[in-house]
Amino acid sequence: MLITETFIVDIAIQKLYNFFLDAETVGTCVPGCESVEIVGENEYDSIIQTKVGIISAKFKIRTQISETVPFNLIRTIGHGKELRNLGHFKQKTEITLKELSENQTEVSYQAEVSIVGRLATFGDRIMKSKAKTMRKEFADSVRAKLNPGHPSDAENTQQIELSEQAESIWRQVITTIIGKIGQAFKWVFHLCRCSKKST
């Protein structure tokens, strides 16, 4: 399964590169991450709890930074298992940074993930849906960490949804009013016809 995401952070590329190399700080942005422990040079363990379908799962993951190109590229490899033996997985991740301006950087990452075990039985559709939710949450968390007060994609999406809901309600109200006016005209027209017949 290939997971990809691209987002923009209002920060200099050097600072963002150093941020992604700090495993303990980045860990706070990963949805469900409970702890990060440095176990060696460019290597760390993390505990991540999540919910896939109807099953709650907790993973222990060993990640290694396998390659870096200063201020442009970070590659990692990792493997882990669910603590109740619900599944195992392997992953390869590539993070690419592109300077858009002095204080704005584009982040592109792709992760190739393979899962075996009970969790794999949920199927590709459910796993991709979960991955989509997590990658959006991660992007929002990175922005919130580096740009406090900056509205996240989730907040923007919520505002759009609320606006669309309000617009839909107004359409229903207007449609109802027009319908009532139409009924009133029909009733008046009916009364006029009855009045003419009676005369």
Image: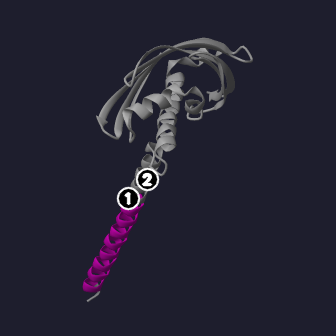
Residue under the point 59% across and 30% down: 27
Q: Is residue 155 left or right of residue 26?
A: left
Q: Quadrant of residue 103?
A: top left
Q: From the image, tell me which residue sits under label 2.
A: 159
Judge by depth and name the residue closer to the eye, 21 or 5: 21
**Quarter holding residue 198:** bottom left
Q: In 3D space, how far apart are the residues under numbered discs 2 and 1 (Cα atoms)?
A: 12 Å
Tell me the residue at 57%/33% (across/down): 25
The secondary structure that most of the magenta stretch takes on is: helix
* Place of residue 154 in the rendered image (x, y in percent of width and height, measured from the top left): 47, 44
| Position in image of residue 74 (x %, y %) | 44, 19
As helix, strand or loop, the secondary structure at mark 1 comes to helix
Q: Which residues are magenta?
A: 168-197
Q: Quadrant of the C terminus?
A: bottom left
Three-letter amino acid code at disc 1? Glu
Q: Is residue 181 rendered magenta in the image?
A: yes
Mark 2 or mark 1: which is in front? 2
- Pick whichever of labels 2 and 1 is earlier in the sequence: 2
Q: What residue sits right under mark 1 in the picture? A: 167
Which residue is depicted at the point 55% across and 31% down? 26
Residue at 31% x, 32% y: name it: 99
In the image shown, does 193 or 185 lie closer to the viewer?
185
